Image: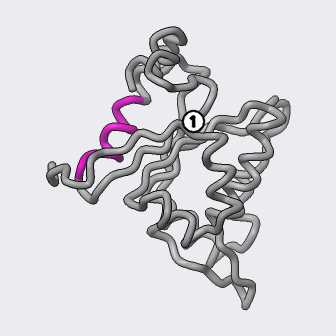
Amino acid sequence: MIIYAIRDELTASQMNMNINKGIILSGPVGCGKTSLMFILNYFFQNSFNYKMKPCRDIAFEFASKGYEALNPFIKKESKQTRMNTYCFDDLGTEKQIKHFGNECNVMAEILLTRYDSFIHDKTMTHVTTNLSASELEAFYGDRVRSRMRQIFNLIAFDKDSIDKR
């Protein structure tokens, strides 16, 4: 992951990583995914730094503010060429949320929008999750999973990794 962060393209490609895609870091609860992504951010050049945001917080913000709460994650700020880079922490822990009767799979909508921005503007996104690929597909659908393959490098902890907390 350090090789990815310092953008060593040659070594990353030898490890089957594409430095122009984001990271999806998956593994069991407590194996250190969130801590690793938090620490990794210090190794990136400033132009590649990212903001960490728990998926549950985004879902709760949607419940209280509606679709406006999604704007920081799906829209460019004025004079930006691409959206801010985010690491969405604990993908799959959020629930289907309603705002005044409007139900939304908040993270599916964010990931689909960020996929479009990745294709057009090279917007980077990172994710941590406890879910496997098949669980992600069951939770978000095959369309989202297909797009995730295109925008993420998968780094997976072994399912038997010990809890480090």
Q: Name the residue: 39% across, 50% down.
A: 26
Q: Nearer the viewer, residue 53 or 32?
A: 32
In the rendered image, which quarter is residue 71 located in?
bottom right
- Percent position (x, y) of residue 78? 84, 37
Residue under label 1, please give it: 22
Q: Name the residue: 53% across, 42% down.
A: 126
- Look at the image and say whether residue 34 sits in the magenta stretch: yes
Q: Nearer the viewer, residue 3 or 95?
A: 3
Which residues are drawn in magenta?
Answer: 31-40
Q: Nearer the viewer, residue 16 or 164?
A: 16
In the picture provided, is 24 more to the left or to the right than 104? Answer: left
Taking 85 as reference, is 43 above or below it? Answer: above
- Percent position (x, y) of residue 131? 42, 61
Taking 3 as reference, is 153 above or below it? Answer: below
- Percent position (x, y) of residue 147? 69, 50
In the picture provided, is 61 more to the left or to the right than 112? Answer: left
Q: Name the residue: 67% across, 38% down.
A: 84
Q: Nearer the viewer, residue 53 or 159?
A: 159
Q: Main secondary structure of the magenta part?
A: helix
Q: Secondary structure at mark 1?
A: strand
Taking 36 as reference, is 8 above or below it? Answer: above
- Crowd rating for badge 1 (residues with CA inside 10 Å; few <14, some 14–19, many 20+): many
- Look at the image and say whether residue 118 sits in the magenta stretch: no
**Three-letter amino acid code of the residue under disc 1:** Gly
- Percent position (x, y) of residue 139? 55, 71
| Image quadrant occupied by the N terminus | top left
